Amino acid sequence: QVQLVESGGGLVQAGDSLRLSCVASGRTFVGRAMGWFRQTPGKERELVAAISWTGGSTYYADSVKGRFTISRDNAKNTVYLQMSSLKPEDTAVYYCAAAGSLGVRTRLNDYEYWGQGTHVTVSS
């Protein structure tokens, strides 16, 4: 069974840092680009960051550039999202997703597998 399991969410104050982790079952992860999305009630799910299979290419939404860093450890089947200088507007459910290709993908429909999400709340 294909699984992506996120962890690391929680309640923090503005300016704090948080690291999200996503562990994938073996076949889910191999040869796939990965992405972190977020969603708030009433809004579409948006791509926050993405990383290629090798980790050599990354993408960041303008709203998180310079604050968030995506990385991966293929030996551990894990992708991370390091979030710094958090703002209240970063509050959302964060989802890990696996794309159907090696290279970075920015469209939601390019992602085939999804985690269950982890909540991040940033208080002002």
Image: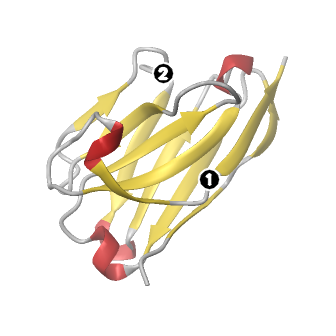
On the question of residue 36 being in view, the answer is: yes
Mark 1 neighbour density, 10 Å: few (under 14) some (14–19) many (20 or more)? many
Reply above or below: 44 against 77: above
Q: Position of residue 117 (x, y in %)?
A: 62, 53
Q: Nearer the viewer, mark 2 or mark 1?
A: 1
**Quadrant in which residue 40 is drawn:** top right
Helix, strand or loop under label 1: loop
Helix, strand or loop under label 2: loop
Q: CA distance from mark 2 to mark 1?
A: 19 Å
How was the colour assigned to the protein in this rendering? secondary structure
Which residue is more in the foreground, 64 or 110?
A: 110
Seen as rendered, the residue at the extreme bottom is 1
Name which residue type carries label 2: Val
Q: Position of residue 93 (x, y in %)?
A: 66, 41
Tally of numbered tags: 2
Name the residue rendered at 38%, 71% in the picture. 77
Name the residue rendered at 42%, 20% in the picture. 65
Name which residue type carries label 1: Gly
Q: Position of residue 74 (x, y in %)?
A: 30, 68
Counting residues from the start of the chain, the first of labels 2 and 1 encountered is 2
Residue for badge 1: 117
Quadrant of the image containing the C terminus: top right
On the question of residue 17 being in view, the answer is: no
Name the residue rendered at 16%, 55% in the picture. 101
Residue for badge 2: 64
Name the residue rendered at 45%, 43% in the picture. 36
Left/right placement of residue 85 relative to residue 74 reads right
Reply above or below: 77 against 53: below
Which residue is more in the foreground, 38 or 50?
A: 38
Q: Position of residue 4 (x, y in %)?
A: 49, 67
Left/right placement of residue 1 relative to residue 12 reads left
Q: Which mark is residue 107?
A: none
